[in-house]
Amino acid sequence: MKPRNVLVPLVIAALCAVAWWVVAGQSGKGDNKMPSIWPKIARADVTSIVAKGQGSTLELRRRGTSGDHWDTLVGTELVRADANAVDDLLAAFERQAVRGRIAYASIKDGNVAQYGLQKPDISVELKGPAEPVVVRFGSISREGQSVYADGGEKTDVWLVARDAMDQTIAGVSGGMRDKRLFDSSLYDVATLEIVADGVTRLLATRDISQIWRFEQPFKGYANNSLFEQELAQIVNVEVVKWEEFGAPDLVKYGLDKPQCEVRVTPKGEGRPAEVLLVGKDSEKGVFVMAAGTRSVAFVGRRFFDAASSDPIKLRDLSFTRLGNDGTAIDVRLRGVSYKLEKAGPTWEATVGKETRPADGDKVKALLDRIRGWQTVEFRDRDKPEDFGVTGEDLVEITLTSIGRDAPGKLVLLFGNDGPPRANDMQTVCAMRKDDGQLELVDAGPLVTLRAGAQQFFRGDVLNLAIDSISGIDREPGSGAEGTKIQRASLSRDLNASDKSWKLNGGVGNPDAEAVNEMLAALRSVPTDAWLPYDNEKDQDRTGLSRARPDTMIVTAHLANVVGLDPDPTLIIGKKAPDGGYFGRVVVKDGPGGGWMFILSNEFVAALSRTIEKAPPPKVDAPKKPDEPEKK
């Protein structure tokens, strides 16, 4: 490397070292240690900010003891300040990095003009519980990333990062006024009240479940989605233009006699309402003013439309408000009484003392109808008892216990039929017990409930896994149909490698095709109709005596099953008048004597197949040539 190429970097390094010594070394009295941040402040302690420069003054005041809300003084008016911008400004001062320090004593004749601090471009005073902190900004450093600053006259000069100065200049020129008119956000609001001519036109509150309810002009639920859409237009309203601060004449804005007052109360005990007065409106928007001020702003039309919304249009039309809940449906209506109840992952239907498996899909479809049950008309001023709602006809839905000692109940009360509505919709008078007034609702779901429990019974009366069947016993019945049935007993060892079927007490092997057809039938025993069964009244008519039914008894023997009857029995009786056969199922600890059903002809035919193969015909062995013929 050439000597000249080595010399140039060395000279530059030396100059940098000298410059550092000049700036950093002049810290006074031989103290070369500089703080990393200047000045030392805590933004939470600052209660007032006064910034002056470029012919303007910005004065910010913290509102009360709140750390989030600031106001800016405009003339004699306090206007909401942009809290985020104020926080950013304080954060910039809180982390203002020191690049160098010049002790005032080392400045010849105290001439700070060389640093632009004789007449500072901008100065800031931060007030709080401690002594006020003053920061004056002067000239920008040569590299452009730092600025000279001091703490007032005859104080040390610091070279600091210019972020705080830039934000202060922007704040002074822009005013730091917030575009929003409410401190509260959508999710902070606990109460919305709109008052016109001294009368509360709308009053709604949010409960602990975050559900909105109307208190005025009626008592009832709001449609949460629609209501919050309108509420968002109110609390998130932004200023399109500030018309006038400290306006002496409010008449021209319609704010001498406002159209209404919008009161927004945030969550939290003792927190005051924020009140906005609404004046003249036009196609483009409306004049508004915070109560207690004379600062007039113009905002968009959407705010005025939301504040003027008809509360009835925001009312929830869901009659039941069930949501994704419901573990039991107890139906107690005139002429019909039953209960649908969830037992683990499955549903059961109970009528009287008898319980049957319910079709889960059908019950879920019913719950969907109940969830979507619509109110047609609200009858808040009518007395329920005048319309037959006395509490005698009801549907009670058990709700999941969440945060309660016992499960909740949704009780729906019904009365007289109402008049038909659009599209010939049938209606019925109804109400939620202890939660609302009289309503006219769609009668469709009630018609379904009145049709009885049978519609929810499972479509198959017996459902067996073929791989778990280790034996089948079939006994012929005592009637004409029974004489056509062959007695049979089959078994197989499910734990053996050879799982072929064997005849018990028979000759030869069972007919594989017949056995497979029988197994396919037992996999799912279907029915289209469940019918009440009384042994004393119905035994002779149906031929369903368990001792000796008309057609047959089939018992399946199950192996390797848990929680199931290992020997479920199917009893098949006489032919039913309208086709098929009467049948019953008897299982241990399960549905049995209280119900019968109709089995199809095809199903019974599959269980009636001849299982034992006929032995092959006997053939004489051929005689030997010298063997005499047998006589």
Image (tube, grey):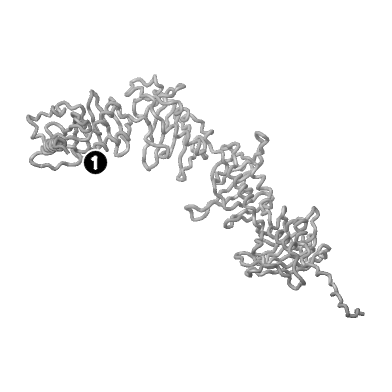
Q: How many marks?
A: 1
Residue at 34% x, 27% y is 293
Considering every residue shown, the one lying at the far right of the view is 631
Rendered image quadrant of residue 134? top left
Q: Is residue 387 above or below residue 490?
A: above
Task: Tell which of 9 and 296 is nearer to you.
Answer: 9
Q: Which residue is denoted by mark 1 in the rendering?
A: 42
From the top left corner, tell me how far across and down residue 462 is, in percent.
68, 59
Q: Is residue 167 left or right of residue 401?
A: left
Task: Tell which of 546 and 269 is nearer to you.
Answer: 546
User: Residue 537: in sight, yes or no?
Assistant: no
Q: Quadrant of the C terminus?
A: bottom right
From the top left corner, tell me how far across and down residue 234 is, in percent.
43, 32
Task: Tell which of 487 and 417 is nearer to you.
Answer: 487
Q: Secondary structure at mark 1?
A: loop
Q: Quadrant of the N terminus?
A: top left
Rendered image quadrant of residue 184? top left
Amino acid found under the numbered disc labelled 1:
Ala
User: Residue 181: in sight, yes or no?
Assistant: yes
From the top left corner, tell me how far across and down residue 328 is, in percent.
59, 53
Could you classify mark 1 by the number of other residues whose Cα lies within 10 Å: few (under 14), some (14-19), or many (20 or more)?
few
Task: Tell which of 400 and 507 is nearer to you.
Answer: 507
Q: Is residue 55 above or below residue 268?
A: above
From the top left corner, tell me how far across and down residue 613 is, in percent.
78, 67
